[in-house]
Image (cartoon, rainbow, N blue to C red):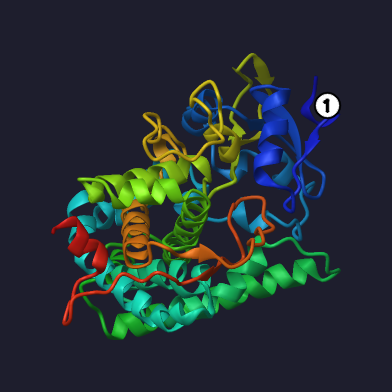
Amino acid sequence: MDLSRRKRCPLDPAADPVEEARQLRSLGSLVPVELPGGVAAWAATDHATAQTILGHEDLTKDPACWPDLNQGRIPDDWDLIALVRGAAMLHQGGWEHRRLRQLVSTAFTRAPIEALRPRIEQIADELLKNLDTAASGETADLREQYAYPLPVRVICEVLGVPDTAVSDLRHSFHRLVTPRESISAEEDIRTAQTDIFTSLTALIETKRSRPGNDLTTALIQARDHDDRLSQQELVETLFLILIAGHETTINSITNTAYALLQNPTMVATALGSHDPDAAWEAAADEGLRYASPVRHALLRYAVKDVEIAGVRVAQGDPVLASLVAAGRDATRHENPDTFDINRPTRREHLAFGFGAHYCLGARLAKLETKIALQALFTRYPAITLAAEPQRLTSIPLQGYAALPVHMTGRTPQPPGSKTCPAHNAAHA
């Protein structure tokens, strides 16, 4: 039966992601769903099927293969239009994707990322010192005051741009991914896209006049001297790295911190480990499985008719992977709704994707999450929730708009200590 004629399960950006995932899994491995705006798609709901979707050679990220979009049946003011259309590597397939990815891939290999470890630890320490003022009982927002600025500062240093490059784009980005009810939604999207292009173009011109040993300079040189990418691709690639380089990491840190706050025995386990570095890395992995920062991985399109999990997916049909559902798959993980940093399958998650589009920044994001958690709970082993956090309203992302906490139980640091407390604990 044609996808458009099937009974579809609606995906609600305001729904509880875990309850939604449970409902989707009960319907099958690959089920028809309805995105906001009445857009039909297939959704993979278990680990194996999601992995197949993410790595399938007959599914592409290129929106040119989506007839509904190209024939005008998807309006320009669709809530998710900015996440499925564009020339950056995220929306390309085949050779074009490989070409754009190769321009930035060396910056995210093991050695450059590992070299960032001391700087990430230093940034975490600085941010926690700023939070010490809340230790007297005031409420702190762990997302806004810690999980947000840490990856922002790191990715801006990788790119060689000021921190304000992200803050200037933050509002515009959220206008692209947040559902709107305004009758001027199309104008709102267009304005946000124009603001982003204008801001990044100005940033690129500044970097042209003051080049450095950074990724932005390398991209500019690839544009100006080697003609390996267009001006539009330069802007979109820079935007993708800026956003992807911090947005999901914010949710990874916040989601895992929230899970740990709800499971103090897991905090005690990590703090009491003979190998704290490994224990906090395990916590980061389990957080990615238990509460993936990506809720639904959008979208791929069938380049020809294909059968997946016993379902016929017709050429042109859009397909997504429900990563929250995949992470809670009971056929893959025993007691999947339990947060357990000792879980033997904790690394078997798809939070960073799979296949050709596996997240370039996965190594950096995981290192940032691990360092952030280790530094936080080592310095504040008795930190507690101040209130239940409010979920983000989003189809592509899973996270919280704020994470209110009481910064209690600080562990005193040695006078004159210049390294983060997590670093001290790991190397004592």
Q: Residue at x 33, y 69 (%)?
A: 154
**50 in relation to 77, above or below:** above
Total marks in image: 1
- Quick one: SS at disc 1? loop
In the image, 176 versus 74, the foreground residue is 176
Q: Residue at x 29, y 45 (%)?
A: 279
- What is the x, y in percent for residue 110? 21, 50
User: In the rendered image, which quarter is residue 269 located in?
Assistant: top left
**37 in relation to 330, above or below:** below
- What is the x, y in percent for residue 179? 74, 60
Quadrant (top left, top right, bottom left, bottom right) of the C terminus:
bottom left
Q: Is residue 351 visible?
A: no
In the image, 178 versus 391, the foreground residue is 391
Amino acid under label 1?
A: Arg
- What is the x, y in percent for residue 256? 47, 52
- Furthest residue to the top? 310
Q: Is residue 390 left or right of residue 223?
A: right
- What is the x, y in percent for residue 381? 38, 62
In the image, 62 versus 189, the foreground residue is 189
**370 in relation to 235, above or below:** above
**209 in relation to 26, above or below:** below
Q: Is residue 128 visible?
A: yes
In the image, 338 versus 351, the foreground residue is 338
- For disc 1, the marked residue is 6
Q: Residue at x 34, y 66 (%)?
A: 223
Q: Is residue 119 left or right of residue 368?
A: left
